[in-house]
């Protein structure tokens, strides 16, 4: 009986010791772990906030750069128009030259079977006026009035026709859409055109201003009474989007 009492007293003593020393032995490591987790959580929140701020800053910078590119592209196009017109201005100082460009958007294809015709959101239509269409600095087609709507005829369409110059000698010609390429028809046989000659808009048709690059000649066809030339266009419009439209050449 006495042994049992001593044993119970021994157990109670051990429990008391464990109770009063638990904080020193166990609590401190647990507290350290808890503080470590809290510190990691705070650092993680800071990292996420910094990432968010950086992402927003980059997004705003990208948007700003896109707007600057649009403005610079328009400026470059108008500069080429002024450069091409400079010689004639020097001869006739009374002329005031003020070309104008607007941005237009391709809304949808006119016909899903024909990727060379698109509806645009251009609202400045005139009854019999044809407008020039530009894409990334190159000629891309024309815009015509189709039942009161602005229809874009891209350069692969056979109804896309405008006036061009060929090479450094500025040989005049009229270019037609021809599926993936274009073709200059009815070139007088005495005009010597060659593969590699650059083709650009002449401005003589009041559709484009002079000097917009169209493409390069890849093949010369000598026919009976005239010469034709196949042109590979510079503009590659895979998925129509935004264009510049020449509202005043």
Image (cartoon, rainbow, N blue to C red):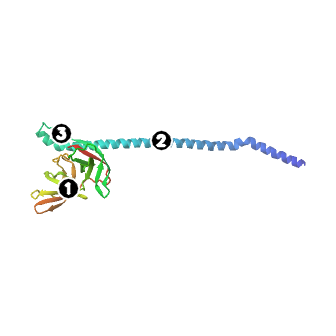
Q: Which residue is mark 2?
A: 50
Residue ranking furthest to the left: 190
Disc number at residue 97? 3
Residue drawn at x 18%, y 43% as measured from the top left: 83
Q: Nearer the viewer, residue 116 or 39?
A: 116
| Residue name at image x 62 percent, y 44 percent | 33
> Which secondary structure lies at badge 3?
loop
Mark earlier in primary sequence (3, 1): 3
Neighbour tally class for label 3: few under 14, some 14-19, many 20 plus, Cα within 10 Å? few
Can residue 192 be seen in this snapshot?
Answer: no
Residue positioned 12% across, 39% down in the render: 90
Q: Quadrant of residue 39?
A: top right
Q: Which residue reaches farthest right?
A: 1
**Mark 2 or mark 1, which has the lower sequence index?**
2
Q: Position of residue 62 (x, y in %)?
A: 37, 44
- Looking at this rendering, what residue extends furthest in the top direction? 94
Q: Nearer the viewer's eye, disc 3 or disc 2?
A: 3
Give the distance between the C-alpha atoms of the residues marked 2 and 1, in whole angstroms. 56 Å
* Mark before the other along the chain sequence, 3 or 2: 2
How busy is the neighbourhood of tag 2: few (under 14 within 10 Å), some, or many (20 plus)? few
User: Label 3, label 1: how many angstroms apart (C-alpha)?
Assistant: 28 Å
Query: What residue is rendered at 14% in x and 40% in y?
Result: 89
Q: Is residue 37 visible?
A: yes
| Residue located beneath label 1 in the image | 176
Q: Are marks 3 and 1 in contact (CB under 8 Å)?
A: no
**Residue 70 in the image, given as x and y percentages of width and height:** 30, 43
């Amino acid at each position: 009986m006495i042994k049992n009492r001593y044993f119970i007293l021994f157990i109670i003593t051990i429990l008391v010791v464990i109770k009063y020393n638990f904080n020193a032995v166990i609590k401190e490591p647990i507290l350290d772990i808890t503080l470590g987790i809290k510190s990691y959580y705070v650092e993680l929140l800071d990292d996420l906030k910094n990432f968010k701020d950086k992402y927003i800053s980059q997004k705003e910078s990208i948007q700003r750069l896109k707007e600057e590119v649009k403005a610079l592209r328009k400026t470059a196009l108008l500069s080429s128009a002024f450069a091409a017109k400079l010689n004639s201005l020097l001869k006739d100082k009374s002329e005031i030259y003020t070309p104008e460009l607007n941005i237009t958007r391709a809304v949808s294809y006119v016909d899903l079977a024909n990727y060379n015709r698109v509806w645009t959101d251009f609202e400045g239509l005139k009854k019999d006026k044809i407008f020039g269409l530009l894409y990334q600095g190159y000629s891309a087609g024309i815009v015509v009035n189709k039942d009161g709507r602005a229809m874009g005829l891209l350069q692969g369409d056979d109804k896309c026709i405008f006036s061009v110059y060929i090479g450094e000698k500025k040989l005049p010609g009229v270019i037609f859409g021809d599926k993936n390429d274009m073709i200059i028809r009815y070139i007088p046989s005495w005009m010597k055109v060659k593969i590699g000659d650059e083709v650009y808009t002449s401005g003589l048709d009041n559709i484009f201003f002079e000097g917009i690059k169209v493409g390069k000649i890849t093949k010369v066809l000598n026919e009976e009474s005239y010469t034709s030339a196949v042109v590979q266009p510079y503009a590659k419009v895979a998925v129509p989007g935004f264009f510049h439209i020449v509202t005043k050449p």
